[in-house]
Image (cartoon, rainbow, N blue to C red):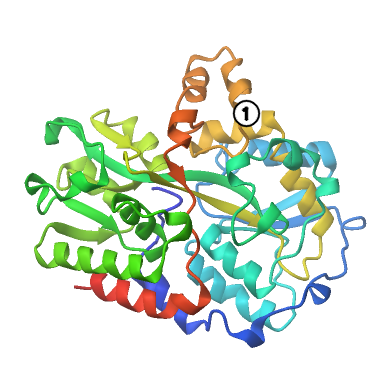
């Protein structure tokens, strides 16, 4: 099962609105975010992540080699939990504590950047001390360094990145797909799926319409909704999906769909007929980022772990397991020089280490603002529910 798309769906948007996202009273001033840091005395930290998003031992999945090596090197024990199954659900889980200036019991979390934007806007993430993170400063992918929601990445650091593009079954379709517009061809009627989540789906579709997604407008959004609604009513779009597009694509019930690069790499191991393409009009580059929530009890320990994963050798080991876009380009040389045939092939895979040509077609979409979100989510979810 894909990690990124696990349990994604329209339910999350409903819970987000119920959580009262963006309420001004929830904002926490920078001066009131730090708690008492017990890192020097307590050599531990609590790290909350998504399932299937870290390397595990082939024979004993309870062992996590990179985390174990960190503990052996530093003496810091990591309590690692795979408790994040949905961005909105997790927001609702720890939001009340953060809103009330209380600790969450977590020193480090991973959320999608559109959710990280919400944490940063609300003042729920602490600024990291980059002087203590030389590997982050040296090795963070330049294309991920300056998101609009967190200039300079002062409060966030990418854990992994990925690409939203098009996956299709080349053998069953009988031709190549190279653009988002080709999804609407007559011979694909009823054989196309789109992602159900607003934040996961809109950017690629806008790119297909020639929109610069780094500065899209409300008019662009409503034009897209009108287009998608027409396609739904014409039964061209089969349905909206979470991670289950993988099954549809594998069985041939769907011939083309919106997809994540990491999913397709995993799927191709069993089905080489599946192709992934970054459309000619462009694809979305996204990231899921590490944050240190307010009042964390082990902030310095968390900063040390973040920097550890930006050592090229460690980043390479993680990339070899998760197969998403590695946010540490220097890890490519580590894999290329490994002498292992599979690892060398991974180093050459542009879906893990995008080359210059692919990077030229990738863009990071501007986030949906707090003011836009409620009405935009309502309109998108109404279309998904048709």
Residue at the top extreme, as displayed: 339
Asked if residue 59 shows in the view, the reply is no
Q: Position of residue 76 (x, y in %)?
A: 81, 47
- Residue beneath the point at 12% across and 47% down: 185
Compared to residue 161, the image places residue 96 above or below, namely below
Q: How packed is label 1: few (under 14 Cα within 10 Å), some, or many (20 or more)?
A: many
Total number of numbered labels?
Answer: 1
164 over 337 or under it: above or below: below
Q: Nearer the viewer, residue 283 or 1?
A: 283
Q: Which image quarter: residue 213?
A: bottom left
In the displayed image of the protein, which residue is found farthest to the right? 41
**Residue 102 can be seen, yes or no:** yes
Whether residue 260 is situated above or below residue 365 in the rendered picture: above
Is residue 287 left or right of 312 when viewed as pictured? left
State the residue at coordinates (63%, 81%): 96
Answer above or below: position of 192 versus 359: below
Q: Position of residue 55 (x, y in %)?
A: 57, 38
Kind of element beneath mark 1: helix
In the image, farthest residue toward the bottom? 25
Q: Quadrant of residue 376?
A: bottom left
Residue at 28 percent of width and 33 percent of height: 275
Toward the viewer: 57 or 183? 183
Q: Is residue 64 left or right of residue 184?
A: right
Residue matched to label 1: 331
Residue visible at 59% across and 59% down? 148
Quarter of the image with the C terminus in it: bottom left
């Amino acid at each position: 099962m894909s990690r990124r798309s696990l349990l994604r769906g329209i339910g999350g948007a409903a819970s987000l609105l119920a959580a009262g996202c963006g309420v001004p009273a929830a904002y926490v001033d920078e001066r009131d975010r730090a708690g008492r840091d017990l890192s020097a005395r307590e050599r531990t930290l609590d790290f909350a992540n998504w399932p299937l998003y870290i390397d595990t031992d082939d024979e004993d999945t309870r062992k996590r080699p990179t985390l174990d090596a960190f503990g052996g090197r530093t003496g810091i024990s990591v309590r690692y939990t795979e408790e994040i199954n949905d961005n909105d659900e997790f927001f609702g889980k720890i939001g009340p504590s953060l809103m009330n200036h209380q600790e969450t019991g977590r020193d480090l979390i991973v959320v999608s950047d559109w959710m990280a934007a919400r944490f940063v806007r609300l003042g729920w993430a602490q600024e990291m001390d980059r002087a203590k993170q030389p590997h982050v400063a040296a090795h963070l992918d330049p294309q991920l360094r300056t998101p609009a929601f967190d200039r300079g990445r002062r409060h966030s650091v990418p854990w992994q990145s990925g690409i939203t593009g098009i996956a299709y079954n080349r053998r069953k379709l009988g031709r190549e797909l190279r653009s988002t517009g080709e999804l609407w061809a007559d011979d694909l009627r009823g054989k196309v799926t789109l992602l159900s989540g607003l934040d996961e789906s809109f950017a690629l579709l806008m790119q297909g319409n020639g929109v610069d997604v780094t500065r899209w407008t409300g008019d662009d959004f409503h034009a897209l909704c009108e287009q998608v609604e027409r396609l739904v009513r014409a039964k061209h779009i089969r349905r909206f999906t979470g991670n289950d597009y993988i099954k549809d694509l594998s069985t041939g019930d769907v011939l083309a769909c919106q997809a994540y690069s990491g999913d397709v790499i995993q799927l191709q191991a069993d089905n080489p007929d599946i192709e992934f393409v970054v459309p000619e009009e462009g694809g979305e580059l996204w990231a899921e980022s590490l944050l240190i929530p307010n009042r964390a009890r082990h902030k310095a320990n968390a900063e040390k772990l973040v920097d550890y994963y930006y050592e090229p050798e460690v980043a390479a080991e993680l990339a070899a397991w998760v197969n998403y876009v590695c946010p540490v380009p220097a890890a490519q040389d580590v894999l290329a020089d490994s002498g292992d045939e599979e690892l060398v092939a991974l180093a050459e895979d542009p879906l893990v280490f995008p080359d210059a040509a692919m990077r030229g077609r990738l863009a990071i979409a501007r986030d949906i603002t707090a003011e836009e979100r409620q009405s935009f989510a309502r309109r998108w979810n109404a279309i998904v529910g048709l």
